[in-house]
Amino acid sequence: MTSEASSGSHCARSRMLRRRAQEEDSTVLIDVSPPEAEKRGPYGSTAHTSEPGGQQAAACRAGAGSPAKPRIADFVLVWEEDLKLDWQQNSASRDRTDTHRTWRETFLDNLRAAGLRVDQHAVQDGNTTVHYALLSASWAVLCYYAEDLRLKLPLQELPNQASNWSAELLAWLGIPNVLLEVVPDMPPEYYSCQFRVNKLPRFLGSDNQDTFFTSTKRHQILFEILAKTPYGHEKKNLLGIHQLLAEGVLSAAFPLHDGPFKMPPEGPQAPHLNQRQVLFQHWARWGKWNKYQPLDHVRRYFGEKVALYFAWLGFYTGWLLPAAVVGTLVFLVGCFLVFSDIPTQELCGSKDSFEMCPLCLDCPFWLLSSACALAQAGRLFDHGGTVLFSLFMALWAVLLLEYWKRKSATLAYRWDCSDYEDIEERPRPQFAASAPTTAPNPITGEDEPYFPERSRARRMLAGSVVIVMMVAVVVMCLVSIILYRAIMAIVVSRSGNTLLAAWASRIASLTGSVVNLIFILILSKIYVSLAHVLTQWEMHRTQTKFEDAFTLKVFIFQFVNFYSSPIYIAFFKGRFVGYPGNYHTLFGVRNEECAAGGCLIELAQELLVIMVGKQVINNMQEVLIPKLKGWWQKFRLRSKKTKAGASPGASQGPWEADYELVPCEGLFDEYLEMVLQFGFVTIFVAACPLAPLFALLNNWVEIRLDARKFVCEYRRPVAERAQDIGIWFHILAGITHLAVTSNSCVCCRYRAFRGDDGHYSQTYWNLLAIRLAFVIVFEHVVFSIGRLLDLLVPDIPESVEIKVKREYYLAKQALAENEALFGTNGGKDEQPQGSELSPHWTPFRVPKASQLRQ
C-alpha cells in the first residue's frame, strides 16, 4: 500500500510539472524554486519532495518585519481507535483497519511533504484512543500557497461603508433607532488584490507575519491542501479529506475556534475579547432579537457564504413586518364580517328548515344549519379584503426581490466577491481527481481538469428520469391521502353521532393533513440522499455549480412534496364530484367535495398544519438535536478521561473542546426551510392572511437560533466565499411569478350553479366568464406593476455603480501607465515615482459588462 501511494504521488507530480511563462520581476521577495524543480500541482497532488521552505523561508523572513508567533494549530484532524476490537475482529475487518491506518499515515506524511507541521496528541483509556493531529503552516508555506490559490489580500484600508436604509430613514426623521447597537472591533474594509509574493510590501500588514493572514485565510489554505493531498493511488480516487471522512478513516476535520464564547470574568467590558465572544455577546444571545445583525463581524469569522445567508434571512424577516401587519388587519376585518355577513346569518338561523343530501349511500340526511361554525370560519378569510391583500402580497414579493438584488450587489461589492464565481473560483477537488482530461480555462488560460459537456448532459438527463420517478411517488402518496380522506369522511358520517357527522369532512381533512406531513418528512430524508449521489455523479466543475444543481433537484422534489396537497385543495377538490344521482368515484370511492363553508377554510387549515407544524418540528430539532448530540459527545469523551484516571475538566486542550461540538452541516437545510416558507406566504396567502405573521414570529426565533448554533454549538466551518445566494434567488423569482397566478385563481373561487336537471345553469357560465376576466386582469396588473418597479428600481445602487466605474477608470489608467513604462524601460519592473499602482497588476476589480447592465 505504501509503495502504491508513493508511485501514485510520483506520477501525479510528474504529470503536474509546469513552468512559469516568464518571471514577473527580476527581484523577488520570496524566492520560489527554479522552474525545473517546481512541483506545484494546483489541481492534483500538493505533496512535495521537499518542504516549500528553505530559500523561501529565508526570503520571507527578509520580506516581513516581525516573525510569526507559534500557533496551537490552524486545523485539526481526529480519529478514534477501539483497541479492544483488534482481537475480536475477523481477518477482513483487521485488513480494513490496517488499510485505514496505512492511509492515515500516508496522508499525514504527504501533508508534511506539502510543508505543514503535524503535531499529534492522544487521549487514551483502557480500550479507546482518540488521536488529534494538529496542523499548522509556516509563514513561507502560507505565502507559497496563497499565491497559488489566488487569494485576495488587502492593499489599502477604506472607511467603513456599512449602511442600513431603516437606520438612515429613522435618522432623517429624527427618531431614536432602538435596533442600532455599536459592536466593538468593527472589521475594516479594504481595496484588495490577488496575492503575489514578489509584491509583498504593497499589501497592508506585511510587516507582521502574525496577523497578515487572517484565521479564515489560513483555514482556506490548509483546507485546500487537505482536499488535494493523496493517501493512495490517485487514479483510484484515493485523494482528499472528503474521501477519508466518507470512508471513516478520520472521524472529524475542522478549523479551531478563536477561543471560548463565554464572557471572561470582567464581562463584556474586558479589554481583549476574541471574535467568537464578540459574536456571542452582540449577535447570538436571545436578548439581541431586536438589534441589527453585525454582518461584517459574521463575514470576518465565518466567511461570505454564511454572512450572505444571515443577510438574506434578516432582510426577508424585516420585509415580513409590513406583510404581517396588513395580513392581521385583513383577518380582523374577517372577524368583524363573521357577525355581519347576511348569507352566513341566514345559514346559521335556518335551524331545521333545510335537510341536505347524504354524504354517502348509507349516510343519513344532515341539516344545513349544522355547518354554521364552518361557514363562519370560512368567512374569516373569504371576503373582499382578501382580494386586495393578494394584490398587496404579489407586489410585496416583487419589491422584496428587487430590493434584495440591490442589497446583494452592495454586499458583494463591499466584501470584494463580485467576480468570484466567474474568475476566482477554482475546480472542486473531487472534480479534479475524477476528470478524465484537461483543457485551458478560457478566462485564466491555465490548464484545468475538464469533463465533456455532452457526457455531463447525458448524466443530467438520466438523473432527471430518477427525479421524475420520485415525483411520481409523491403523487401516489397524494392519491392515497385523497382516498384516506374520502374513506374517513364516510366512516365518521356513519358513526350515528349528529355532531361528528356534521364535522366528518373537517375530521378527515385534519387527520389527512397530519398524515401528509408525516409522508413529507419521511420522503424528504430519502430524496436528499439520492439527490446528493446524483449530483456527485454529474461531475460539476465548481462548488457553486455543484450546489446549484443539488439545490434545484431537491427543491423540485420538495416543491411537489410540500405543495401538492394545498394545490389539490385549492384547484381540484370539489370540482369532480358530480351531483345528486350522478356522483363521480375514484377506485369505487366517491370523490371528495368541499364542505358547506367552502374549500378555502380547508386550504387555510392545510397551510397552518404543514407550515406551522413544520416550523415547530424544525425548531424543536434545531434546539434539541444539537444539544443532545453535543451532550452525548461530551459525555462519551469525558467518560473516557475519567476511566483513564484524569479529571473530566482537567487541562482540556482547545482541540478537545471543539471536538465535543456538533459538526456543521452547511446552509442547505436553512435556505430550504426559508424558501418553502416564502412559498407558503406568497402562493396561498389568499387562503390564510395570518401566514406572514406566523412566518415573522418564526424568523425572529430562527435568526438567533441559527446564530447560536454557529457560535456556540457547531464546530467552526471552513470559511467559504460566495457572491450571492446562488440559485435560491432564481427559485424565489419563480415562486413569485407562480404566486401571482395562484392568488388570482384562489381569490376568485365560485361554487357551481346547476339547474333541476343537474346541468350547469346560465349563472354558472356568466360567473365563469367573470372569473376568467378577473384572473387575466389581475395577472396583467400585477406583472405590469412589477415590470415598472423593475425598471424604476436599479439592481445596483447608484452609489455602488459610481464606485465600480471609478475603479474601472483607475484600472484603465494603470494599464496605460504600464504600457508607457514598458515602452520606456524595456519592461523592467520599476515603480513610477508617485504612483501607488503596481505596473504588473492592478488593485482594482474590473467589473464585468453584465454586472454594469444589472
Image (cartoon, rainbow, N blue to C red):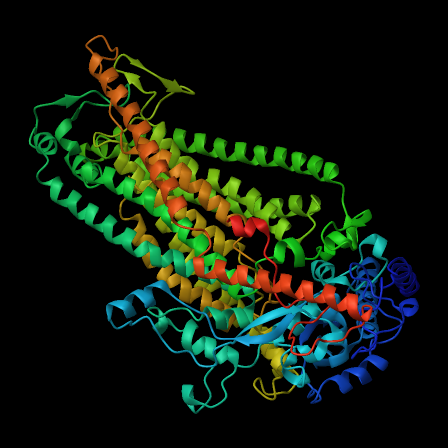
Percent position of residue 745, x then y: 32, 31
Query: In this orientation, which residue lies closer to the viewer: 360 or 209?
Result: 209
Give the residue drawn at x 75%, y 70%.
145
Q: Is residue 168 above or below residue 246?
A: below
Percent position of residue 416, x then y: 57, 64
The quadrant the N terminus occupies is bottom right
Which image quarter: residue 585?
Answer: top left
Q: Is residue 684 above or below residue 581?
A: below
Query: In this orientation, which residue lies closer to the viewer: 97 or 701?
Result: 701
Q: Is residue 531 at all visible to an observer of this figure?
A: yes
What is the count of numbered marks?
0
Give the residue drawn at x 61%, y 62%.
845
Percent position of residue 450, x then y: 77, 47
Query: In this orientation, which residue lies closer to the viewer: 142 or 200?
Result: 200
Question: In the shown orientation, is residue 102 left or right of residue 513?
Answer: right
Question: In the shown orientation, is residue 374 left or right of residue 160?
Answer: left
Q: Is residue 424 above or below residue 690?
A: below
Which image quarter: residue 153?
Answer: bottom right
Q: Is residue 484 at all visible to an observer of this figure?
A: no
Query: In this orientation, which residue lies closer to the viewer: 675 or 623?
Result: 675
Extreme residue toward the top, this view: 757
Percent position of residue 814, x then y: 66, 66
